[in-house]
Image: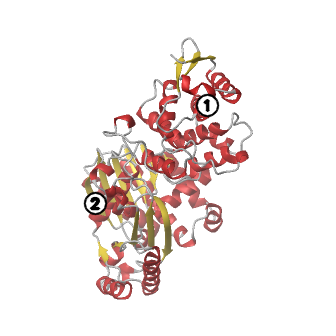
Amino acid sequence: MDGPADNDGAEWEPFGRPLFNDPKARALSRVGVVDVGSNSVRLVVFDGAARSPAYFYNEKIMCGLGAGLSQTGRLNPEGRRRAMSAIRRFAALAQGMGIPPLTAVATAAVREAADGEEFRREVLAETGVRLWVIDGREEARLSAQGVLLGWPGSYGLVCDIGGSSMELADLAEGRVGNRMTSPLGPFKLREVKGGKKALKSYIKAEIAKLHDAMSGETAMRLFLVGGSWRAIARIDMERRGYPLTVLHEYRMTVRQVSATAEYIAEQDLDALRARCSISSDRMSLVPLAVQVLRELVRVFRPKDIAVSSYGIREGMLYEQMPRELRERDPLVEACAFAEAKDARLPGFGRILHDFVRPLFPRADWQKSRIIRAACLLHDVSWRAHPDYRDEVAFDNATRANLGGLKHQERVFLGLALLHRYSNRREGSRFEPLFKLLPTAEQVQAEVLGKAMRLGAMLWLNADEQPGQLEWHPNKKTLTLRLSEHARPLFGEVAEARLGALGAALGATTSVRIGD
């Protein structure tokens, strides 16, 4: 359903009118990509709001295509058989879904193998899938673009580790700069001769080369892309007892990386793998990958380390986006799409946002976008049983595939939506997650949720503002000004919700009707 009509988008400021109804965005509403890596072959079908798509289908098969490549110069025979079987399956799935031709790329293993071109011809003949082989620099660029899908305007260093190679790309002002590739994939490291000392020396020398080639600067932020990095992050969560096991935007410090490397060395890997739900194929690469990561962060000294679930596949989608779509906020776009699809009154989120905004006069642009997102999502969980709407709303916000959200912001958004349906959060099974948010932020989320809870009682239609909140923080007074048209909507329940909002603010409340 279309959002509110407007000519120039001014009513949607400061976020801009959603673009998912634009024909150029709809053309990207379902896109299938295949990534043939040295270790795994994956199909992802993106669907939904084109700027922040959902994963309609996502399947990975650990094939080990590049295992033994350094010794034989050829693709691993068993890996090749499994990869061909996977691509055959993926092509059939894509045909069944009725999506356009798959976009498929192959990286280091197919690029370097003597029989790589033969494999490409076999794939095309048997499946009709044209496999594009990209070099290391192009792989780095696409991975960096994947990061930009989730974080427009990002800056820092993107590091993508695969089975046979590791790529670096510099990001500045949302653009990809210098790019490098290296033989630091775990499959290659397995074949380094001379034992642990030689391996350590080899990793150190290769990363020193990368540091020199990337201008020898420290990285303000390091984005980690790739399955081995995500496995290490999951282990870091296990070591820390971290309550929110969402890998995207999980943050680590240099010290935590070092502690987790030591933790891995001390553990029984099979037991650790089971506790962290990591595949045995992936776990076998972790001890090598963590050595690389430890040296990488020691040399580049990042002030912030962020795990990105977005990489080369998302970069391929980003490549197809028009510029105006690339520059949109992926969080707000996804939430606007969810409102249009699932809310009872699509478009009311904008009205609700105008209603609650006076309560947050000092909100910066980051907090403003979270408030906007909450208002757009305030009603998308209405189909849940009334006794569980608060939990469903919190769970959706904290665990959904949403780009551009730090973990603290996920909890803030979830807590606001929880209070949209419930006055209390004490005793919730989500209490361990609340602790990720400072107390003052928990109170702000409660205020936002209770303001949305009140505003939801004042529905007129998606284009009419039923009233305004006037908040005087110094005087601790909150006034609800209602239009004459909205007078019948202010009954006992709305009055109670105004009182609950006033209590959250520590304010006295009053109501005024008309001008």
Q: Residue at x 35, y 56 (%)?
A: 25
**CA–CA distance in space, label 2 to label 1:** 54 Å
In-image side of 79 versus 379 (left or right): left
Q: Residue at x 40, y 74 (%)?
A: 38
Residue 320 image position (x, y, % from top left): 30, 61
Q: Residue furthest top?
A: 475
Image quadrant of residue 139?
Answer: bottom left
Image quadrant of residue 135?
Answer: bottom left
Residue 308 image position (x, y, % from top left): 44, 54
- Structural crowding at the residue carrying mark 2, measured as other residues with C-alpha within 10 Å and reported as few (<14), some (14–19) or many (≥20): many
Residue 454's disc is 1
2 or 1: tag closer to the N-terminus? 2
Tell me which amino acid carries mark 2: Met
Residue 180's disc is 2
- Structural crowding at the residue carrying mark 1, measured as other residues with C-alpha within 10 Å and reported as few (<14), some (14–19) or many (≥20): many
Residue 409's disc is none
Mark 2 and mark 1 in contact? Answer it, CB < 8 Å.
Answer: no
Tell me which amino acid carries mark 1: Leu
